[in-house]
Image (spheres, rainbow, N blue to C red):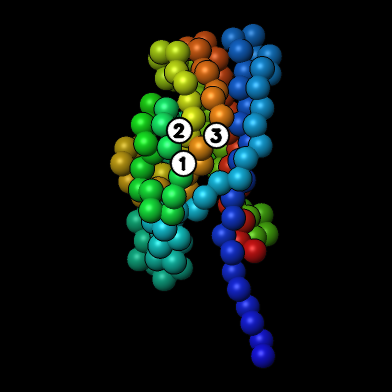
């Protein structure tokens, strides 16, 4: 019997730089593709989905992610994706949270990918250990979603 299964998995890399662009923290994490993200992918395959993934957000909630999540627990900033590209069976999204985004010192514990500048459909969410972003710091997140 032929059995074919497809998994959607994700990983992300967070690089945290100080105002002098010195790397002060780096995290490599696994992520959770949430139910709304899986539905989004399925809808896009038949052309009924909404706009493409276009933004990444960070937030201050350390509540563990679940497949039922539709938003971050406490969104603090959202930016347009810097780049998005497909290579073989993987999609890579990159976003930069520049100096001043967010405008205050923020304790970050979560990130997500969305298809809108506000609200929208969430593809995936991850939580992580504390990243304290000062207003002059820069954070770059590279997120890869693989279909295996």
Question: CB of mark 2 within 8 Å of CB of mark 1?
Answer: yes
Mark 2 residue element: loop
Mark 1 residue element: loop
Question: Tag on residue 64?
Answer: 1
The CA span between labels 2 and 3 is 7 Å
Q: Is residue 144 left or right of residue 98?
A: right
Near mark 2 (Cα within 10 A), the count class, few <14, some 14-19 or many ≥20, is some
Residue 136 rendering spot, x and y as whole percentages: 52, 10
Question: Number of marks in the image?
Answer: 3
Q: Is residue 19 left or right of residue 121?
A: right
Question: Tag on residue 62?
Answer: 2
Q: Residue furthest front?
A: 63
Q: Quadrant of the N terminus?
A: bottom right
Quarter of the image for residue 131 reads top right
Residue occupying the point 63% across, 27% down: 15
Residue designated by label 3 = 128
């Amino acid at each position: 019997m032929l059995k074919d299964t497809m998994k959607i998995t994700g990983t992300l890399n967070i690089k945290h730089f100080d105002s002098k662009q010195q790397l002060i923290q780096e995290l490599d994490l696994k992520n959770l593709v949430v139910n709304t993200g899986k539905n989004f992918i399925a809808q896009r395959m038949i052309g009924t989905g909404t706009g493409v993934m276009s933004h990444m957000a960070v937030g201050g909630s350390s509540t563990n992610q679940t497949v039922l999540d539709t938003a971050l627990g406490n969104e603090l900033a959202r930016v347009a994706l810097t780049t998005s590209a497909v290579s073989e069976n993987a999609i890579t999204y990159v976003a930069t949270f520049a100096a001043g985004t967010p405008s205050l010192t923020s304790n970050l514990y979560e990130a997500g990918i969305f298809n809108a500048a506000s609200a929208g459909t969430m593809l995936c969410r991850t939580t992580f250990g504390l990243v304290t972003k000062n207003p002059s710091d820069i954070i770059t997140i590279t997120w890869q979603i693989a279909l295996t």
